[in-house]
Image: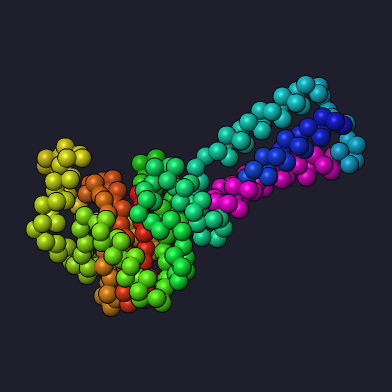
Amino acid sequence: MKIRLFRIILFGLIALANLTKFILLGTRGSVLQFIICLIIVIAEVMAYKDKKEIKGKKIIYVLCSLIAALVVSYISSWRYGFGKMAGIYSLKLNYANSGNYTTTFFPQKVPEGAVLKDMGHMPTIMQGDGFVYAVFDTEDETLLNRLENEASKKAIMSFSAKNWSQGEYSKEQLDLAEKIFRERTGFENIDPTIGFTDPARISNNFEDHDITIYIIDSNFYFNHLRTDAVLVDHTDGVIEYVGM
């Protein structure tokens, strides 16, 4: 019966680790690993309570337990995405940053006077490019202006959402995009693309909202577009940060 306690403790610890990861980071995949381990623990606790004997050799039982624990632990270590539902903002930034997603231009803590309206992280899957984003809502115009000013100082170019939707850029912006694109890709027969990911879909309101887009960095490559950007919706008092 002590061997059953071994499996209960083993998978109980893995379940606790996954639950802790979800609570601190909000990683959705950790919930599934937690549930799997919890089911195993509950089944073993019931067998232990009923004093059911282990069928087969005990060494096989132990080896199977260790192998299963290693597999679940390995899967638990995968990089999972997160949403706003759970987790601590600063820890989420560090988690995304550890996966080489740029978060250095994000506010490192929720600004006083602002509300974290939305946040999410989608890890890179095969050839798909992942991202991390945070959206803040504020009624403090001074705060919004300060955050926008900070983004402006870090930006390599900026334009209105309306200009972006119509493809209207200055010659300086087009020249800079081409220069960076050629340097980073080496392609000569492909035109650069000025674009970005907007998970919160703020740019969908370009027709009736006053929205400014700040490009912090970009490779300007349409096939694997990786653009760090800040979007400021002056109409709704919303600012979105997107890191790639």
Q: Quadrant of the N terminus?
A: top right
Q: Residue at x 47, y 47 (%)?
A: 94
Residue shown at 57% from the left, 58% from the top: 86
Q: Would you place residue 209 above or below residue 199 in this image?
A: below
Left or right, 41 with respect to 154, comes to right
Furthest-right residue in view? 51
Quarter where residue 99 is shown: top left
* Residue 134 in the image: above or below residue 48: below
For this orientation, the residue located farthest to the left is 171
Magenta stretch encompasses residue 22: yes
Between 209 and 56, the residue placed more toward the observer is 209
Expressed as whole percent of the image width and height from the top left, the position of residue 129 reads: 36, 46
Image position, residue 179 (x, y; %): 13, 46
* Residue at 41% across, 77% down: 139
Viewer-nearest residue: 167 or 239: 239
Left or right of 31 on screen, residue 102: left
Left-right relation of 240 to 69:
left
Name the main secondary structure of what is drawn in magenta: helix
Task: Give me the residue at 69% from left, 28% from top.
Answer: 66
Does the stretch in magenta take in 49? no
Residue 202 appears in the figure: no
Where residue 225 appears, as percent x and y from the top left, is 28, 48
Instruction: Choose top left, top right, bottom left or bottom right for residue 48.
Output: top right
Q: Looking at the image, can residue 79 be seen?
A: yes
Q: Is residue 140 above or below residue 84?
A: below
The number of numbered discs placed on residues in the rendered structure image is 0
Percent across and percent down for residue 13 are: 70, 40
Q: Is residue 80 left or right of residue 101?
A: right
Residue segment shown in magenta:
19-47
